[in-house]
Amino acid sequence: MYEDKTLTCKECGNEFIFTAGEQEFYAEKGFENEPQRCKPCRDARKAASKSGREMIDVTCSSCGNPARVPASLRNKPDVLCSECFAKQKEAE
């Protein structure tokens, strides 16, 4: 049903492959637009947006392991580590 597509990154101008698997994932999630940036540019953009984020050390309320989370979660009663958060998302 889906076939690999070659797209051009609007950030760096390089071509990248939008694989059939990625297209299927986008369709399952209800995304209507194709990606406009290649993976390295998307990753760099994500990292840049997170670099200014203040992080704090907490204890996961589920497993008790230490975790590093955004400071905006400081006053939340149930803060999860990334592993427990991912497990919770999968269960939903």
Image: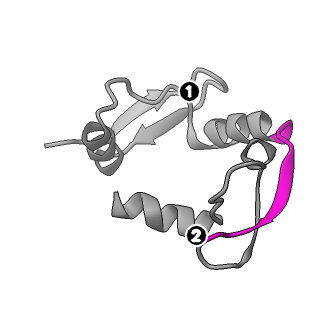
Displayed quadrant of residue 58 = bottom right
Residue bearing mark 2: 83
What percent of the width, then of the height, locates residue 33? 37, 23
The magenta region covers: 51-61
Q: Is residue 60 magenta?
A: yes
Image coordinates of residue 87 in percent, x first then y, are 46, 68
Circles 2 and 1: CB atoms closer than 8 Å: no
Q: Measuring 72% from the left and 47% from the top, which residue is drawn there?
A: 73
The three-letter amino acid code for the residue at tag 1 is Cys
Binning the other alpha carbons within 10 Å of mark 2 as few (below 14), some (14 to 19) or many (20 upward) gives few
- The residue beneath circle 1 is 9
Q: Residue furthest top?
A: 10
The residue located at (46%, 30%) in the rendering is 35
**In the drawing, what numbered circle is on residue 41?**
none
Q: Nearer the viewer, residue 41 or 31?
A: 31
Indicate yes or no whether the magenta region holds residue 26. no
